[in-house]
Image (cartoon, rainbow, N blue to C red):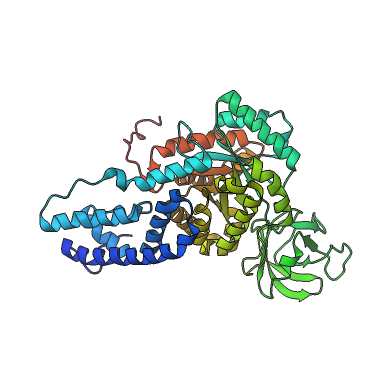
Amino acid sequence: MLSAPTTHATEAQTLLETLIPLRDAVHQRAEHLLTGWQPRIKRTSFADGARNLAHYLALREHDLRSLQISLMPWGLASMGHIESHVEDGLNAIIDTLQALQDGTQRAVPNYERYFEGEDQLNCETKRVLGPSPVNRRVHIMVTLPSAAADDDGQLISQLLEAGMTCARINCAHDDAKAWARMIGFIRQAEVTLGSQCRVLMDLAGPKVRTQTVSHKKHMFQKHDTLLLTYNDVKKRSKQYPYQVSCSLPEVVRQVEMGQMVWFDDGAIGAKVERIIPDGLVLTITEIAKGGQRLKPEKGINFPDTSIQIQPLTAKDRTDLDFVAHHADMIGYSFVQSADDVVLLQEELVKRLGADASKKVIIAKIETRTAVTHLPEIIVQAAGQQPLGVMIARGDLAVEIGFDRLAEIQEEILWLCEAAHIPVIWATQVFEGLVKEGMPSRAEVTDAAMSERAECVMLNKGDFILKGVTILDAILTRMGNHQFKRMANLRALQSWQSLS
């Protein structure tokens, strides 16, 4: 709830005495950040984005809420939408207040300069995701199922006609022959339909997954005991009848007593009660009423554990031999630092030479550490080549806690807008619609809110065509109402008709 500030900044002079020192402090702090970043910035088209990002980070070190409220009665509420043009936004407010105080006419604003940030974001979005669709600003990405490699391209053509502009191939599944067929069908459909579709190939990364599960039909309940073993499952263990093995036991060995382990995107939460030579003895503490089965190939998360592991696995490096030459965008799973970005960039140089700087990287933000290091990840990646950021909400929610997901999602959107970097809104968008044929009300709202990103990703499902069609309609309509966080004040006649 908004209310008048406790200290009434009613005069222009009072506000100027706050704003001018703030602007100067932000500028000084930003210059310091830029000096540290400079060696990483080789791409001139990112120079303005880096500068604005530095100013945004410096600005957001301050609590601005009281100042915002003080500016509102003066009609100066733009600070709440300052992400893409921090310097110009602060200067515009100060210039207006100065003119009001002096009783002079303010100079005509430089509209082109003021909106340069939005223009640069649009240019970078085009570099990363391709030209925007005719009827909407936001791209639609679809994860292709394995069947898309074997249906003569029918599904891919239908998806393109429905509104898909980017296709995601998950390298955790299938192989290079299947990927090549999918990409071939995409290129054929582009020619036939006169459409454009970028291809994202998503490296699997060091994702820990369940492998063998004893008693797969068992419905786990709260307080059940489960052994997460370092080894193979012993199917006839009297002491630990319920066991599960995993894809990366070296990660499990880093988990400590009392820490939490989550399975299947947070469907089962368990606490480490004992550590024995065979693995972790877990007690289930969080689970849905009625219980939950645990199946193979389900993700495992360790949000309390600082995992030390290379973000590029041996499989990723092998897959890169194909991906580097065939993908428009490379999805980087579990990237957590600037050094991780350097690792991928070095691998791309080995395969592409000087052309490595043209290849788009999509940094998937899915851990607590990645959120903490997001500015340096952006600078290292975008300083060398085109970059997009994916909010991978499945793992991210488990890692940071479901109660913080909405907050952190917003902060990632703001930070990327400040850097003029496009964002992909991913995981469980229209999950019920795509898998079951009918969305929940909450899913519809989530899909509408996704218009603030530059791309929305749908996962595969039996009703994927219906999902793309409805998402296209929602994004088209919402594009008339808002741009990022700013409301577009079109004429409203909803109470007269629903056209």
| The N terminus sits in image quarter | bottom left
The percent coordinates of residue 320 (x first, y second) are 68, 48
Which residue sits at x=70%, y=39%? 179
Which residue sits at x=74%, y=32%? 150
Which residue sits at x=74%, y=75%? 274
**Left or right: 78 in relation to 472:** left
In front here: 273 or 145?
145
Task: Locate residue 438: give its quadrant.
Answer: top right
> What is the residue that sits farthest to the right in this orientation?
236
In front here: 40 or 142?
40
Q: Please tell me how many numbered marks the rendered image carries.
A: 0
The percent coordinates of residue 442 (x first, y second) are 52, 47
Which residue sits at x=34%, y=66%? 28
Above or below, 287 against 477 in this view is below
Above or below, 425 against 471 in this view is below
Task: Locate residue 230: give its quadrant.
Answer: bottom right
> What is the residue that sits farthest to the left in this orientation?
103
**Left or right: 391 in relation to 74:** right
